Amino acid sequence: KAGVTQTPRYLIKTRGQQVTLSCSPISGHRSVSWYQQTPGQGLQFLFEYFSETQRNKGNFPGRFSGRQFSNSRSEMNVSTLELGDSALYLCASGTQGTQYFGPGTRLLVL
Amino acid sequence: KQEVTQIPAALSVPEGENLVLNCSFTDSAIYNLQWFRQDPGKGLTSLLLIQSSQREQTSGRLNASLDKSSGRSTLYIAASQPGDSATYLCAVRPLDSNYQLIWGAGTKLIIKP
């Protein structure tokens, strides 16, 4: 089976712009979670989707949003980008209590 | 509120040594605990998953233990190799979550040839 894929792998944006990141889970997985990883804060949970519904949400501002499609692919959107949004964004798909992570999208906000 | 701590933050050992990485958590109400490996600039690779009812899991040269009552887990790496150099993270899944994981800050491991 193919693993979790994330696109794009690298992204450079400027403050105030918006960005959309994409995640394709492992075939058959219905849960997709998103995490932000920064040197200062480590890994932090953003949100989790299951069967197109947001099931869990971390403590991030409303600028961070996501959605999941009927084929379980998920997108994450960040509006009005700030310098502090520069991070590695990781997506994971899950089944039976185990999560499998994609390679991440590295976002740099200038 | 669940908190996960990993000590030490960094560790450098000569090749061939056996070593132990530590992970502690404040709330024993967990579903499972996972150890991950992260290479620089890369995603996460799951190494071992221990369910709350289990005491340990083994995979090759890796052995992870779980003592839920004391809120501790250890990752034992036998006969370390330079290729083991990476950051090792532990994460717990609280009982009241679905797939949300609470993460430690990681231990950066360097194996010197």
Image (cartoon, helix red, strand yellow):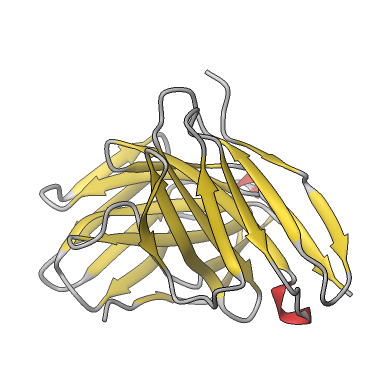
Q: Is residue B16 visible?
A: no
Picture layout, residue B93 above or below residue B79: below
Which picture quadrant has residue B111?
bottom right
* Residue B76, x across and y down, in percent: 38, 54
Q: Can residue B102 be seen in this view?
A: yes
Picture layout, residue A92 above or below residue B8: above
Which picture quadrant has residue A98?
top left
Residue at 50% from the left image edge and 45% from the top image edge:
A92
B21 or A23: which is nearer to us?
Answer: A23
Residue at 33% from the left image edge and 78% from the top image edge:
B3
A39 or A30: which is nearer to us?
Answer: A30
A62 or B72: which is nearer to us?
Answer: A62
Q: Does A82 sit left or right of B105 as displayed? A: right
Q: Does B52 sit left or right of B38 as displayed? A: left
B111 or A33: which is nearer to us?
Answer: A33
Q: Quadrant of the C terminus of chain A?
A: bottom right
Residue at 63% from the left image edge and 81% from the top image edge:
A40
Q: Does B25 sit left or right of A18 as displayed? A: left
* Residue B43, x across and y down, in percent: 62, 49
Badge count? 0
* Residue B71, x across and y down, in percent: 20, 72
Picture layout, residue A51 above or below residue A65: above
* Residue B58, x across and y down, in percent: 31, 39
